[in-house]
Image (tube, rainbow, N blue to C red):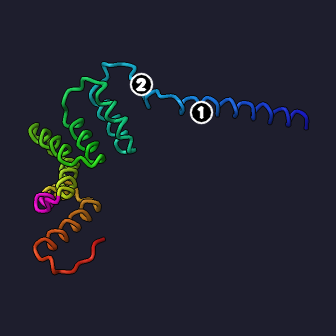
Amino acid sequence: MCCLLYGFQLQFGRLIFIFSIVSKVLDSQEPFFSVRNPDVKQGTIATSLTYLVETKHFSEAQTFLRSFGAQTTPEILLAQANLYFGLRKYTLALSFIVEAQKLQWDTDDFYFLKGKILFALEEYEASYKALEQSYKMNPLDSTKEALFRCQIRLNQTTDPNEHSTEL
């Protein structure tokens, strides 16, 4: 019993030590991440940026992006567009989509995001075309649902007296 109690006290002491370290880290004003190697490959930058955006760490994603002299690749442009879409800066997000279009980047993810941005900007016809292209390339349920929502908005703008239910 004495050894068991001593073991508990030792473990309890470690927990207090761990909590004190976590508390110091959380209280510090240090960035969420640190850049160890400025010569990181572009794919790693795009993957890291995408992860930060998907986990809704938008300010960290902006800081991360500014930390690198990253070349403009389609993956980074898509991640930037996602970042500004998450921040509800739709016009800025669309500017990154336009840049990716200039590179002739043609993926379903690209068209899906373009459709979402245009939908947010209430450009329903252009949104529908982009979502339709995404669905043709990769028929996902999420794209089908987005197309359905867009079609409802198009119908409402064509005939505002029509009653329809949105999912």
Of 34 and 109, nearer the camera is: 34
| Rendered residue at 14%/62% (across/down) | 124
Residue 106, numbered circle: none
Secondary element at image label 1: helix
Label 1: which residue?
23
Residue 144 position, x and y percent, is 24, 64
Residue 111 position, x and y percent, is 17, 51
The mark that comes first in sequence, 1 or 2, is: 1
| Rendered residue at 26%/43% (across/down) | 84
Residue 82 location, quadrant: top left
Secondary element at image label 2: loop
Which stretch did the figure color magenta? 122-129
Residue 24 position, x and y percent, is 58, 29
Q: Mark 1 against mark 2, which lies toward the viewer?
A: 1
- Quadrant showing the C terminus: bottom left
Counting labels gives: 2
Of 18 and 146, nearer the camera is: 18
Relative to 15, say whether 88 is above or below: below
Q: Residues within 10 Å of mark 2 (few under 14, many from 20)?
A: few
Q: Rounded to the nearest whole Å, what is the CA distance between mark 1 and mark 2?
A: 18 Å
Relative to 17, say whether 52 is above or below: below
Q: Residues within 10 Å of mark 1 (few under 14, many from 20)?
A: few
Label 2: which residue?
34
Relative to 19, say whether 89 is above or below: below
